[in-house]
Image (spheres, coloured by chain):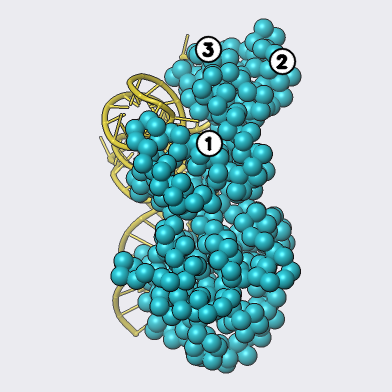
Amino acid sequence: MTSQFSPKSDFLRTLMDRGYIHQCSDFEGLDQKARSGMLTAYVGYDCTAPSLHIGNLISGMMLHWFQQTGHRPITLMGGGTTRVGDPSGKDETRKLLTVEQIEDNKNSIKGVFGKLLNYAPDGNGAIMIDNAEWLTKLNYIDMLRDIGRHFSINRMLTMDSVKLRLEREQELSFIEFNYMILQSYDFVELARKHNCSLQMGGSDQWGNIVNGVDLGRRMGTHQLYALTTPLLTTASGAKMGKTASGAVWLNADMFSPYDYWQFWRNTEDADVSRFLKLFTLMPLDDIARLSALAGSEINEAKKILATEATALLHGREAAEEASETARKTFEEGMAAETLPSFNLPIGTGLLSANVAVGFASSNSNARQLVESGAVRINDVVITDTRRVLTAEDFRDGAIKLSMGKKKHVLIKV
RNA sequence: GGGGGAAUGUCCCGAGCGGCAAAGGGGGCGGACUGUAAAUCCGCUGGCUACGCCUUCGCAGGUUCGAGUCCUGCUUCCCCCA
C-alpha cells in the first residue's frame, strides 16, 4: 500500500525498511516535516494491567527509532483515559478499574520505557506525561462546548470500535463512547503544550488517532499526523502474545527473562526476518544475512533473535544467561543452575509438585499429564502418579523436573 | 406499557426426546514426526483423599425415584409494537 512512496527522511525510511508502517495520514507531509527539524511524537499507553505486553512493544520500538533519528518522543500514560476504557477491539465492556489500581498499574508500567528510550532532560530527551493531568480537570459543560461540538455523532457511529459493537448488538456504554473524544483531545493538548505533531500506535488505534488529527484542525492547532503499525500476528495468522499461562508481559517479575528468551526462540521460521527487524536493533544488512539461512540453520537466527530481543528489554547479561541456560538444557540435556527453581520438601507427591511449579493447573490435570508421559524427573519419564520426590532424586542438590520438551525447572529443598 | 425470543462446561462458539460430567468445533496443553519451527496424525481439556465420590447448564423455588431438559417467580440481554 505504500509501495509508491519512498521516504527521504531518516525517520520514515528506517520505519519503512524495518516494517513498522501500516498506515499514515500523509506520507509526503510527514516526510517533509521530519526532514525540516526535530519533531515531537507520542504514543499513548493504557494502564489496564501492571505491565505492558509484546503487543505494545512495536509502538515502543517506533518511539525508539523516532528518537534515534533525532526526534523527541513522548510516552503518554493513560492515567485519565483508562478511567474511561477504550472499547476498541473489545467485545464487552470491561470492568472499570479503580483509580488506585490505575495508579499502581501506571507506576508498574513506566519502567520498561527506560530500556527503549532516553529520558535525558535536554535535547531530544523523551518525556513521560500522564493525561490525567488535564483530563481530570475538564469541566463537563466546557468540554461539551469546546470539544464536543466538533464531534459528529453520525461520524462516530461509523467508527469501527463503535460500529462493531452495534452490529453485534453488544452493549456500548456512554462512558466508552466518550473514549475517542478524550483521546482526540490528548493529541490537541500535546500539540499545544509540547508542540507534538505526530501520534503513533497500533492499527486498531487508527480511528482514534485520526479523530485527533481532525480535532486539531478544527481547534486550530498546527497540522497533525497519524502513523500506525501493523497488528502483530504470526505467519500462521494467530494473534501473538498469548501463551497458555497468559500474555507475554514485558515486566520481568511477570514473565521471566528466560521465558521471554524462549518465547522468541520458538518463533516460526517464516517470522524470523520480520521479527528481527521489528524487535531487535540489528542492522538490516546483518538481518538480511541471517534471513538467508534455510532449513534447520535458521535456528541460529532464532537464537540471535531471542538473545537480541531479550537484551533490549532485560539487559545483555540476562539475555546471555537465558541463552546459556537454554543451551545447556536443550543442547547438552543437563540441568543448568539458572533454570527457574522452586523449593519443595522431600516427600512431595509428583502431582502436587507439578502444580506447585505451575506445570499443571490441578492435581487432575497433573495426573493426566503424567499418565500421558509428559512428565520427567531428571530426564526420565515417570508415569506413576503416586511417585514421590525422594532424596535419591537429587543430583547436585537439585531435581530437574520437566513437562513436555520445553518446560524445565529445578526443585531444591 | 404490551408481545416474542435468549442465557449451557468460569477461554470462546455451540448441540442438548426427563437418566448428563453433558454432542461438535475453535483455542490451549501433552504425545508421535521434526529443527525447541510449520504442516500432519493421536490424546487430554470441572474438582477430589479417584475402578468411587463431589460440584456444574443466569438466579431462587416447585413437580418427579430422577431436571440442563417440565412448572412458577426473579435478573440480564435482544427483537417487534406503543
Q: Earlier in the sequence, mark 1 or mark 2?
A: 1
Q: Say few, some or many: other residues with alpha carbon within 10 Å of mark 1 (under 14 / 14 to 19 / 20 or more).
A: many
Report, in whole angstroms, how far the alpha carbon at label 3 lies from the one at label 2.
Answer: 17 Å
Residue under numbered circle 2: A397
Residue type at numbered disc 1: Gln
- Amino acid at dot 3: Val
Which residue is label 3 attached to? A380
Q: What's the colour of chain B in the image?
A: yellow
- Circle 2: element type: loop
- Horizontally, is A197 left or right of B82 in the view? right
- Residue drawn at x 44%, y 50% is A285
Residue A291: percent from the left, percent from the top?
39, 43
| Chain label for disc 3 | A
| Residue matched to label 1 | A262
Q: Is residue A136 visible?
A: yes
The crowd level at tag 3 (other Cα within 10 Å; few <14, some 14-19, many 20+) is few
Dot 3 or dot 2: first in sequence order is 3
Q: Is residue A9 left or right of residue A105?
A: left
Question: Given the image, what chain letter belongs to the residue carrying mark 1?
Answer: A
Q: Amino acid at mark 2?
A: Gly
Give the answer, above or below, for where A379 lies relative to A277: above
Residue A89 appears in the figure: no
Q: Could you tell which of marks 3 and 1 lies nearer the N-terminus?
A: 1
Position of residue B6 measured from the top left corner of the image (x, y, whole percent):
36, 55
Graded by Cα atoms within 10 Å as few (under 14), some (14 to 19) or many (20 or more), the crowding at tag 2 reads: few
